[in-house]
Image (cartoon, rainbow, N blue to C red):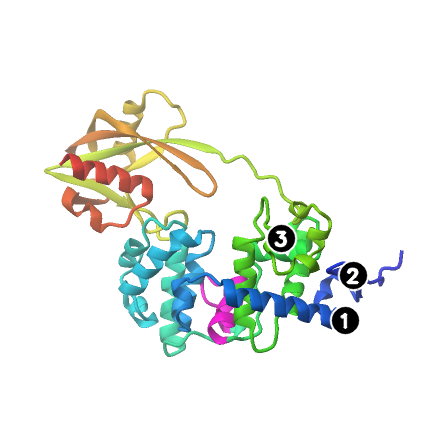
Amino acid sequence: MNKNRSAPICWGRIKTRIPSALNADATSDIPRRRKIQAKLLRWYKKNRRDLPWRRTRDPYAIWVSEIMLQQTQVSTVIPYYLKFLKSFPTVRHLSKANPSKVLSVWEGLGYYSRARNLHRASRIVSNHFNGKIPDNLTDLRALPGIGRYTAGAILSIAFNKEAPILDGNVKRVLSRLCAITGRPDKTETRLWRLSESLIPKGDAGSFNQGLMDLGATICAPKEPQCPKCPLCRLCEGNASRNPERYPTRTLRKKIPHIEAISAVIQRNGKILLRQRPPRGLLGGLWEFPNWKDEVKRSSRFRLRNCIKKEMGMTAEVKEFIGTFRQTFSHFKLTLHVFRGQHLSGKGIGRWIPVKDLALFPMSRIHRRIALGLRNAD
């Protein structure tokens, strides 16, 4: 077989030969490409979602929105976005903020590494770019937490530069448009090239946001509304009468279930909290001392031993408070919580009055415990 043989890229119902699948931007079917651009831009102008970050061209605000939108739905992001910008209206405000304050404002949105990276990046922008968000791919991607997609979104939306984007919604739209199948790791480069080849000169921001909105509202993973799609007559997936076949789906791994035990330890009206390491899962957040419960029996005895061995103190483990659950991205957690009473030793962590627990950023599961204590106080 000739290794130099060209690979087909489909534009509507016509197959165009291009030098290779890695050069999807080299398609010679310019009229069809222009139809896609025109139809999508016209549709977006009439149907664009009214989102708060679309009411500004401020690169900082757009950057914040794109970080928050990573792996999080738009409806969830909106109130956090507004709250965050009220607390940190400029990149310099954010750069000067205490990391704990940033995590407190972010609390509840999850994926806390995003907040830590955003804060670190804001300091780099303030110190090395005079407080101005970089307007080029190299400098943007050098900032913590900014990958190729986020950089493309910022460049195209904030600066109207011809930078491609490729998130889950856009992958689905392009995969169906050109009937692209295959494992994600095999099609990624081809889809990036395709995304780049479609960008119209002078209107990158609107076009990219049109792709986002089309994937979010019309070209859904299941039961896509093809008759309402502006690209339906140009779409190979629609022509196949089985658009849900694209893109190729990967089997999700079973999420492991972790059981753990925790103690709400009291001393003179205060509660012991410990802070997680600054990096890693839930980095920098505060929590009630807890440990994996691998034995799943004699929980009080194990909890007492863990407190003595790892917290530098002795405590009496008293009554059972309750069971709390939370699903994280890679595991499910069931936390069995007991009340504890300090007996001796200083303890590792900070003793906090119950009324002040709200001042310390926590994950959702520990916040629920704290709220229960406040309500019972």
> Mark 1 is on which residue type?
Ser
Q: How many marks?
A: 3
In the foreground, 164 or 199: 199
- Quick one: label 3 or label 1, which is nearer the N terminus? 1
Residue underneath mark 3: 227
> What kind of element bears circle 1?
loop
Q: CA distance from mark 3 to mark 1?
A: 28 Å
Residue 53 is left or right of residue 44, and the answer is left
- Which segment is the magenta one? 139-159
In the image, residue 180 lies at what x, y percent?
70, 53
Residue at the right extreme?
1
CA distance separating discs 1 and 2: 12 Å
Q: Which tag is nearer the camera, tag 3 or tag 2?
A: 3
Contact between marks 3 and 2 (CB within 8 A): the answer is no
Considering the numbered disc 3 on the image, is that residue within a helix, a strand or a loop? helix
Q: Amino acid at mark 2?
A: Ile
Q: Residue at x 36, y 31 (%)?
A: 260
Pair 1/2: label in front: 2
Q: Which residue is mark 2?
A: 14
- Between 271 and 109, the residue placed more toward the observer is 109
The numbered mark, 1 or 2, whose residue comes first in the sequence reads 2
- Dot 2: what SS? strand
Residue drawn at point x = 88 percent, y = 59 percent: 2
Residue visible at 43% across and 60% down in the picture: 67
Sequence-wise first label, 3 or 2: 2
Amino acid type, label 3 = Pro
| Magenta stretch secondary structure, dominant | helix
In the picture of the structure, the residue carrying the numbered disc 1 is 28
Residue 348: x and y in percent read 24, 42
Most foreground residue, 141 or 76 = 76
Q: Quadrant of the C terminus?
A: top left
